[in-house]
């Protein structure tokens, strides 16, 4: 690869990183946020009293709106004290569940310490580096809090300072610290913005986390948490009674959908210009996820070929990347591998049935994008979990249920529009999928009723028995477990251990990190000490090891570490 190609590839990877809201610089966050009623309503919910849950899949804007709200509150003395903290590294504590009997206590301390560290950052921003005031507010040395978090995330033994923090830290002390900060800086109350709060890969931590959220709410403190659709909050947090849900995932049927997406692009990518028809199609193919829309806009503007060829390729690539993201959930949650596999069959079945319906007489002059499934079938536990995994991945959007008579309630689902467009389910009967034809087809009047189909019609009666929770096999002989309670293998007698997802991630080869360029992977492959992700992150100063490579200096080494760390955080979130 020549120098020009290598530089261009690295530039694209950096832009992909910058597209994430947690990487956007503060001033760009201020300038690049679209002004619209939909977003203003989300902002008002975040600064209001009471517990709020921001609901939506990855990339829909949860992090962006939380950071934007934090920024506005920071600069307005009349607004509440806003503390923004992300929990996207929660899975680094997953091994503790198998190695430490007090893993839940350690997790509690980690959550509280991270909030106190974020509170310390707010104190510094509002009051300068006044160590006496900060220590009085926090009750702990910031360095000790940071040391506790670092050691817990790296699985290291606690030294004297972190051990002292662990023995005394509590939610009550956290609330006292937050109120002390409000008093010190003249704020009447506080909002705690808890980002990446859907700890779905470790249910044990998820349930405990929302128990903390429940008790964080006081007359002066209002917690806000970002979650995925259909998140299970556990037995002690009743979302319908203890919080208000705020939809951040914008439906493509929203009357202002296209103008809202256009406003986002005007703020974030003002120099990218495409035809009106292409722009409309990309907005809809993004399926309510601004990050996807911006990525496809940029990819289209850089690609060569006819307009139709490039448009189809960009949408097909996006549809496949969404499927790959969904399939990766089977690696993260092996117990749901069968549900995920059958769930993709369900998605394909919905697309097939919609395409066939669109081709028939009922589809002429109308668009049919929604499938209704009998609510009694979805209510079965494994079936509902299968649908929820599709919702979590953003591959289907659930609309309000509809009744077609007594005992005929249907749950309504719209498959991802990029998948429908790629499967030619929108422009059935035409020989082309040009932008203009797609816009015309997607602008038709929607059918009055959803396409009603049973599960056996969508996935086949043979696939329904495949719905099960997968148990980890024996690591020694590979035999399947018979029950979840089984402790020893019935074939070889070895002790059965639950697989650690964190350990599995650390064992992945560096070549599996998609953000690294081909040139970077080739260079890293020549290092003797670094073969896996865990090898790289285990080195105290990984940059020094990378700088041993020819043409890898400080900047490029830091970029490689950043790419790998971002991949791990996203993989385990």
Image (tube, helix red, strand yellow):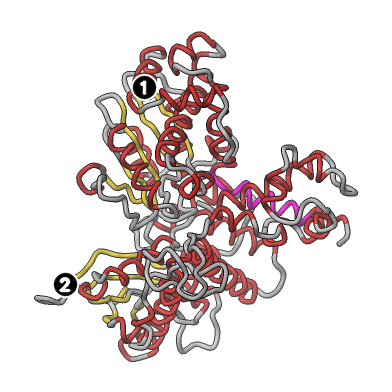
138 or 239, nearer to the observer = 138
Q: Nearer the viewer, residue 374 or 144?
A: 144
Numbered mark located on residue 307 in the image? none
Residue 212 lies, with reference to residue 346, above or below; the image says above
Image point 25% across, 71% down: which residue? Answer: 380
Which residue is at a point 28% across and 24% down the rendered structure image? 220
Query: Tag 2's secondary structure?
Result: strand
Whether residue 280 appears in this view of the structure is no
Of the image marks 2 and 1, the number of the one nearer the N terminus: 1
Q: Identify the residue at horizontal 33%, vertical 79% (top origin).
A: 366
Q: Position of residue 498 (x, y in %)?
A: 48, 59
Please identify the quarter of the rendering in which residue 189 is found.
top left
The answer to which image quadrant residue 526 occupies is bottom right
Q: Is residue 298 above or below residue 342?
A: above
Residue 403 is labelled as 2
Q: How many marks?
A: 2
Which tag is nearer the camera, tag 2 or tag 1? 1
Residue 15 painted magenta: yes
* Residue nearer the viewer, 532 or 401: 532
Can see residue 319? Answer: yes
- The secondary structure that most of the magenta stretch takes on is helix
For the magenta stretch, what is the residue range? 8-21
Residue at which label 1 appears: 173
């Amino acid at each position: 690869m020549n120098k020009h190609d290598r530089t261009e590839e690295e530039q694209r990877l950096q832009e992909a990183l910058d597209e994430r809201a947690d990487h956007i610089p503060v001033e760009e966050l201020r300038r690049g946020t679209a002004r619209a009623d939909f977003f203003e309503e989300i902002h008002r919910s975040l600064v209001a009293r009471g517990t709020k849950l921001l609901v939506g899949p990855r990339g829909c804007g949860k992090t962006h709106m939380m950071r934007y709200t934090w920024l506005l509150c920071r600069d307005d003395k009349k607004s509440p004290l806003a503390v923004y903290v992300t929990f996207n590294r929660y899975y680094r504590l997953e091994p503790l569940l198998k190695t430490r009997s007090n893993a839940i206590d350690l997790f509690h301390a980690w959550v509280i310490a991270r909030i106190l560290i974020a509170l310390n950052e707010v104190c510094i921003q509002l009051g300068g580096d006044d160590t006496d005031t900060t220590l009085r507010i926090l009750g702990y040395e910031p360095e000790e809090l940071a040391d506790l978090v670092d050691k817990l995330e790296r699985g290291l033994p606690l030294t004297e300072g972190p051990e002292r923090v662990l023995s005394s830290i509590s939610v009550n002390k956290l609330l006292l610290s937050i109120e002390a900060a409000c008093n010190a800086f003249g704020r009447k109350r506080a909002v705690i913005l808890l980002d990446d709060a859907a700890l779905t890969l470790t249910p044990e931590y998820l349930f405990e986390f929302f128990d903390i959220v429940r008790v964080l709410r006081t007359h002066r403190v209002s917690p806000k948490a970002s979650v995925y659709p259909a998140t299970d909050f556990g037995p002690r947090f009743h979302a319908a009674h203890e919080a208000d849900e705020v939809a951040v995932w914008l439906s493509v049927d929203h009357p202002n959908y296209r103008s809202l997406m256009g406003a986002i692009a005007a703020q974030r990518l003002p120099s990218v210009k495409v035809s009106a028809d292409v722009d409309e199609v990309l907005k809809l193919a993004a399926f309510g996820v601004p990050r996807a829309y911006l990525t496809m806009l940029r990819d289209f503007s850089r690609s060569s070929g006819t307009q139709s060829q490039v448009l189809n390729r960009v949408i097909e690539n996006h549809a496949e990347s969404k499927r790959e993201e969904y399939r990766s959930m089977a690696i993260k949650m092996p117990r749901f591998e069968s549900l995920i596999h059958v769930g993709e069959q369900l998605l394909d079945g919905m697309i097939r049935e919609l395409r066939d319906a669109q081709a028939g007489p009922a589809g002429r002059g109308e668009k049919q994008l929604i499938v209704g499934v009998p609510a009694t079938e979805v209510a079965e536990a494994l079936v509902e979990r299968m649908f929820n995994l599709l919702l979590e991945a953003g591959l289907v959007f659930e609309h309000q249920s509809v009744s077609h008579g007594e005992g005929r309630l249907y749950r309504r689902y719209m498959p991802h529009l990029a998948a429908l467009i790629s499967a030619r389910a929108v422009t059935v009967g035409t020989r082309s999928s040009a932008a203009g034809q797609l816009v015309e087809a997607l602008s038709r009047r929607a059918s009055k009723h959803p396409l009603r189909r049973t599960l056996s019609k969508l996935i086949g009666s043979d696939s329904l028995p495949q719905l099960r929770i997968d148990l980890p096999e024996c690591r020694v002989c590979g035999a399947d477990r018979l029950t979840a309670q089984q402790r020893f293998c019935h074939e070889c007698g070895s002790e059965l251990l639950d697989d650690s997802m964190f350990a599995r991630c650390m064992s992945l080869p560096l070549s599996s990190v998609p953000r690294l360029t081909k040139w970077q992977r080739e260079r890293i492959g020549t290092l003797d000490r670094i073969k896996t992700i865990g090898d790289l992150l285990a080195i105290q100063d990984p940059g020094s090891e990378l700088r041993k490579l020819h043409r890898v200096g400080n900047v490029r080494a830091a970029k490689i570490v950043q790419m790998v760390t971002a991949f791990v955080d996203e993989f385990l979130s």
